[in-house]
Amino acid sequence: MKVQQFEYKPLAHYSYALVSNGEIAIIDPERDPKEYYAFAKANNAKIVAIIETHPHADFVSSHLQIQKETGATIYNSAKLGADYPHTAFDEGDSITIGKATLKAINTPGHSPDSITIVASQGSDTILFTGDTIFIGDVGRPDLREKAGNMKAKREKLAEMMYQTITTKFTDLPDNAVVYPAHGAGSLCGKNLSDANSSTLGNERMGNWAFKAQSKKEFMDTILDGQPFIPSYFGFNVAINKTGAESLEPAIERVPFKKDVAATGLIVDMRDEAIFKEGHLAGSINIQAVSDNAKFETWLGAIVQPEEEFTLVITSEEDKNYMLNRVAKIGYEKQLKEIITLGTEGLVKSADLDVQDFKNNPDNYTIIDIRNVSEVQEEQFFKNALSHPLNELRETASNISKDKPIVVHCAGGYRSAAGSSILERELTGATIFDLSENINNFK
């Protein structure tokens, strides 16, 4: 039994291939299945199973595409209510992959339909915990109040997670390897470790959820301080319950136009320096210039599900890369077109005199677009107004235009998006992006 972990960094997502004796199970696959097919070919093995630990909220899975293209069986909890061909995989059920045995444990808490997969061969035990156990944390319980086949209030799911952690893993060995579906940077929990795996023994010692505590203490901790919920999360739960369209035909339908303008909602993925030198009026600058940029998260937080938009890219060479990134969260169907810009009709962003701002901060309206929990932890400017980025399109009209406006975040990435939103929403206002200069004010 061998396990290969695949990481998609922008969403801090881990998926897995378990191979034994020429057979493979794919666990919690991402939207593009190519890397799993390459792994199968390299190992001269056949994909025979796809297992979903739950219907994910933060990315679209390729389980249905893999099933169609390989004939593999999809396994998930009957509680999921899947609309695609599948086999129920719940507590008491087991499947064989080569010489490995995979059993399901129902582990509700993050969602009512979550399972943990216990894989064993010989003396080896591996746990694929999905969004139940993370390294150093457990999955948040507040994503299923309005989404999925089984809806549940956060308090009920928090109570379920307490029962899961205190009763479901007690008979498993300390040396069982823990492979979660997410790592640090994911919005599916609040305190995930940078580590990409652990052991159950280490989690029993170091994960707050396993320490001795009352149910109330556990519930208070898990419900407190969770990050914001992006708009697209419920949308992705629904897509994953239904099963997404295969990737290639989905993105091939999006038209590409070169050196043109556009109207309506426009998202510009270019580097902020290039964007500020010339962009279409009203564009929102959500950068995707590196594999670490959280483009998908902020696209799905700023643009509503099913809201049409145009995507501006740097060059035609970026087209397929960006179509793939948009499709990670199922937004390809609402992508009206993907374009590059010409040279006519572009506008520039205002340049901030950082020294003047430093000397005379009261001459400016300062907008802090970080998450509420970040602001509560530390404020960089005493008179800054809190307007979280994910709410900014709705709250911008509450911001006075009587003084120049300076937008900041924690490092500069989000403020590029925030300042461009205010340029779009506050006609006639002077908008500045503090960008990476925020580091001089910490």
Image: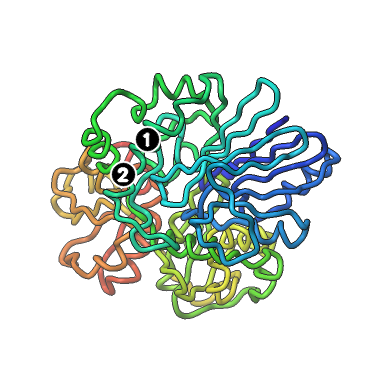
Which amino acid is tagged 2?
Ala
Which of 171/219 is in front? 171
Horizontally, is 128 left or right of 111 in the view? right
Q: Please report the residue visible at 35 percent of the width from the left and 37 percent of the height from the top.
A: 163
Instruction: Identify the image quadrant of the N terminus.
Output: top right
Closest to the observer, 372 or 164: 164
**Callouts 1 and 2 close, C-beta under 8 Å:** no
Seen as rendered, the residue at the extreme bottom is 263
- Tell me if residue 89 comes above or below residue 331 in the rendering: above
* Badge number at residue 191: 1
Q: What colour-coding does the image apply?
A: rainbow
Q: Residue furthest front?
A: 92
Relative side of 358 to 315, left or right = left
- Rounded to the nearest angstrom, the CA distance separating label 1 from label 2 is 16 Å
What residue is shown with label 2?
A: 158
Query: Residue at horizontal 67%, vertical 45%?
Result: 26
Instruction: In the rendered view, tell whether residue 248 sits above or below residue 385.
Output: below
203 relative position to 350: left or right: right
Marks 1 and 2, the one that precedes in the sequence:
2
- Image coordinates for residue 126, horizontal then vertical, percent: 60, 30
When the figure is inspected, residue 384 is found, relative to residue 232, above or below; the finding is above
Q: Position of residue 170 (x, y in %)?
A: 44, 26
Where is residue 27? Give x, y as percent.
62, 45
| In this view, the mark in front (1 or 2) | 2
What residue sits 68% from the left and 33% below the top? 3
Q: Secondary structure at mark 2?
A: helix
Q: Residue at x 40, y 19 (%)?
A: 205
Could you say which is closer to the camera, residue 249 or residue 420? 249
